[in-house]
Structure formats: structure tokens, C-alpha cells
Amino acid sequence: MTARSWSFRRVSTTGRAPLASLGIPFGLAGLAGTWTMAGATLGTPAGIGDALWLLATVVWIAAIGNYLVRSRNHGGRVLRDVDDPVQGPFASLAPTTGMLIGSHLAVSLPLVGRSLSVACIGLALVLGARFVAQLAVRENSVDLVHAGYLLPTVAAFLIAGQSAGGLGWPVAAIAGIGVGLLFWLLLGTIVLARMAFRPPLPAVLLPTFAIFSAPPAVAGNAWFAVNGGGLDTAQHLLLGTFVLLIGVQLAMVVTYWRLSFTLGFWAFTFTAASSGTYALHWLDLAGAPGRQVWGYLVLAVVTALIGSIAVRSVLFLVRAHATSLRSGVALPANRTGRSPARASRLPRAGFSLKGKANAPMTG
């Protein structure tokens, strides 16, 4: 994996930001959506959800700006990152998060929300098509495949369907869900086969397997946006798959617990949040006994998980920054010919590949 992981090594030695850092606002937007659903089903204060949406929006803008500025300042090229077989799929998180934010904004600011949603759906379409084209035209190694491959097509288009459904565009919504379901079957099979029949993923990429369990909940939330929030045969089919795949993640808790913390743990957050939102919707519509108690339990677990990852991320970056100040090294000259005074080389930060390509990544 050393040769194909060259861009990860380059990121770690130049102080550039990884595309995987876009998972942070993605997870926060998912948590905001869970609290918004909790407001509708459990009667929790609406202000909590609004505050989380504001936080997700600010972090989304900051994460994109951080990536672009650090990439430009340290001689990076966005297209090279987008085409990278390991970190490239995470580029789709920028427009996917924008769809979620745009759908929420459309409630109070219709023109702004709709415009943002349309722009992000268009960008997601471009990135998704480019991702599939690259799979077709370049030589690929199945050992580089991880569950993040579900992001540019499955997650992006299911959320595009959810966004379109919420905005009152049923044809676009069903089309987006159709694309998401198709590639869930195609790429999901490849991801599972890679996990089953090839050597284990590097430890730092193992949290991405949480993404494998997200599609049933994301598809269910999207279908709720299309069918008016009712229970039907499609939701019954998705529910069974949802329960099984969440069970898979629960069975892997011990494995995940043994991993060293990195910013890659944000891969857990949107799966947790979308699953929480889906569960809250189901509990409310099915009229399950004790649904209020179960609903608050779901909300507490999702919030505690994402909150703990956020807190640990802040502590992680503070320690990493302190380490970089103590042991900084000079960076290569950037494209303007100027060389920064210090490097922001952060040990074991973000997504890195261990083993032969034992290179850390900055967060």
C-alpha cells in the first residue's frame, strides 16, 4: 500500500489538511438532525437543534476553508486528492453536509436553503460521476477499498433524495434514492468482500467500517421525506436491514475500543446520528410501548457518543499542536517558492496508514 498511499505521506510531511477532516461537520450535522427529530417526537427544546445546526454550519465552512488554504499554502492539488484511492471518497462530504444544512435553512430562509441544496446536489453529482469513472479507468487494488467508498454515491445520493424530498421535488428525490440504493448493492458487496477475504484494514481506517451500516437508516430517512413520514412496505424492509447492520457494529465494539483514538473516529458519528434519527421516527410512528423512554435513551446514546468524540478530538489536537511546536521541522517550499518557518507535523493525527506506510496525518 506504500505507493498508493503516497498522498497520505505527503499530507503528514507538509502540514496539509486531509479530506477526511470534512467528516467533522458531517457528523455534527447528523447530530443536529437527530435533535431536530427529537424536538418533533419527544418535545425536546428546539433551540438545542438550532444551536447544533449553527455549529455544524460554522464548522463546515471552517473545515472547507482549512482544507483549501492549507492545501494551497503547502503545494497541494485538490484534484489529486479527489482522485486518491484512499482519501478521495471523503471529498463528497463537503456537498453532502451542505445538502443537510441547505434543507434545514430552507425552512426559515427558502431562497438561501434551496440555492445551497441545488448547488450541493450538483457538486455531489459531479464528484460521484468522477469517482465511478476513476474506478473504471484506473488500475485499482482491492486492498485499498474501505467503507468510505460508499460516501460519494450511496450516502451522497440518498441524502440528495432526502433533501429533494424535503424541498418538495418528489421526482428528483426518488431518482436520488434509486442511485443510492443501486450503488449500495454494488459497492456494499465489494466492501464486505474486501473485509472478508483480504488482510485486515490498517487500524486507522477500521473506523470507516461504521459507514457500512449507515445506508438503511439514511435510505429510511430519505424515504420518510418522500412518502410524507408514513410507514409502508419499503420502511419495513429497511427496518430489518437496519437492525441487522446496527447489530454488526455492536458486535465490533470491543474491536473499536482497542483502537488508538484518531480523528478517523468521526466516521462513527453520522452512522450513529442517522440511525438515531431513524429510530426516533420509527418509535414515534409505531407507537411503541415506552417510546418516550426509548426515545430519550436513543438521544442520550447518540449525543454521548458524538460529544465524547468531539471532546477527545479537541484534546487530541491540542496535544498534537503542542507536540508540533516542540518538534516542528521545516516544510518543503510551496509553489510560491516560500518555505514556512515551521511544520505542523502532528503524530498519529487523522487518517494514516500503518504498517508499510506508517505515516501519520494531520487533522
Image (tube, rainbow, N blue to C red):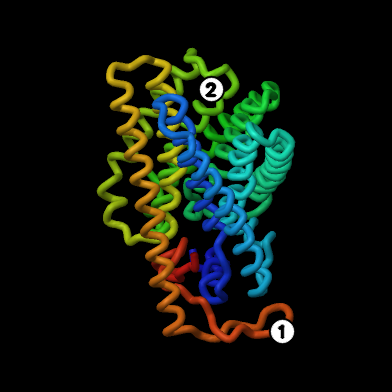
The spot of residue 104 in percent (x, y) is 60, 36
Locate residue 193 relative to residue 169 in the image: left or right.
left
Image coordinates of residue 267 in percent, x first then y, are 45, 49
Res. 241 visible in picture: no
Three-letter code, disc 1: Gly
How many labels, in total?
2
**x 68%, y 23%: residue:** 168
Disc with the residue nearer the chain's start (2 vs 1) = 2
Can residue 256 be seen? Answer: yes
Q: Amino acid at mark 2?
A: Phe
Q: Quadrant of residue 113?
A: top right
Task: From the image, tell me which residue sits under label 1.
Answer: 337
According to the image, label 2 marks what residue?
224
Query: Looking at the rendering, which quadrant does residue 196 occupy?
Result: top left
Q: Residue at x 60, y 41 (%)?
A: 101
- Give the residue displayed 39% in from the left and 15% down from the top: 286
Q: Tell me the number on the disc at residue 242.
A: none
**Image x and y of residue 278, in percent:** 44, 28
Q: Position of residue 28 (x, y in %)?
A: 49, 47
Q: Is residue 245 above or below residue 206?
A: above
Q: Are marks 2 and 1 in contact (CB under 8 Å)?
A: no
Q: In the shown orientation, is residue 126 left or right of residue 193? A: right
Q: Residues within 10 Å of mark 1 (few under 14, many from 20)?
A: few
Mark 2 or 1: the one toward you: 2
Q: CA distance from mark 2 to mark 1?
A: 53 Å
Relative height, residue 262 to residue 97 (above, below): below
Query: SS at mark 1?
Result: loop
Is 172 or 285 nearer to us in this picture?
Answer: 285
* Residue appearing at x 56%, y 65% in the figure: 17
In the image, residue 355 above or below residue 253: below
